[in-house]
Image (cartoon, helix red, strand yellow):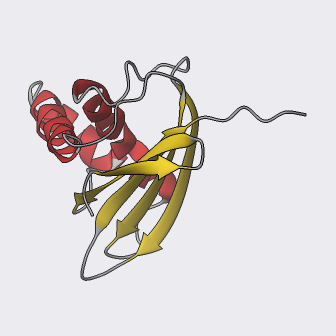
Amino acid sequence: MSAITGFRGDGMKAELIIPGELPSMNEIIEAAKRHRMAYSNMKDEYTELVRLNCLRCHRFDNPVSVSVTWYTKDERKDPDNVIAGQKFIFDGLVKAHVIPNDTRRFVREIRHRFETDRKNPRVEIEIEDYEEEVP
């Protein structure tokens, strides 16, 4: 289901799957402490992984809402540790030209869900046009 793009009501929606788990905050910190280039290499590798999975995605010019479902192999990592990988996701989306930038001007909402899948850990990402809630 990687890089599936389609219409959703009056707007666009893109869905993609990143196989495996992205590095956790603890793994990122460990890499940064190990060697000054270790984090840089990690960032390049995982940003490119996301970019490659986005090649067929719809391009969004307007603000978006992003939902991320993290399927980890177990429940040992804290949610705030798991979501550190979102840095690679948003940088990959920008690099693939799916979104123009990952500032708050374009990314208006981020939602996270956490699930366990021992046999198929992955990250499922859904991007859609942001719809402002009217009070």
Residue 66 placed where, x, y %?
Answer: 50, 43
Decide if residue 75 is in sight here.
Answer: no
Q: Quadrant of residue 97?
A: top left
Report the number of discs. 0
Q: Is residue 69 above or below residue 102?
A: below
Side (left or right) of 44 relative to 12: left
Side (left or right) of 93 relative to 42: right
Residue at (38, 41) in percent of width and height: 86
Decide if residue 91 is in sight here.
Answer: yes
Residue at (29, 81) in percent of width and height: 118
Q: Nearer the viewer, residue 52 or 76?
A: 52
Residue 111 placed where, x, y %?
Answer: 57, 48
Quadrant of the drawing holding the C terminus: top right
Q: Nearer the viewer, residue 8 or 49?
A: 8
- Residue farthest to the bottom, as pictured: 119
Residue at (53, 61) in percent of width and height: 113
Quadrant of the drawing holding the N terminus: bottom left
Residue 20 placed where, x, y %?
Answer: 22, 63
- Residue farthest to the right, as pictured: 135
Residue at (26, 50) in percent of width and height: 23
Q: Quadrant of residue 88?
A: top left
Q: Is residue 55 above or below residue 3?
A: above
Residue 125 placed where, x, y %?
Answer: 39, 52
Q: Is residue 26 above or below residue 51?
A: below
Q: Quadrant of residue 70?
A: bottom left
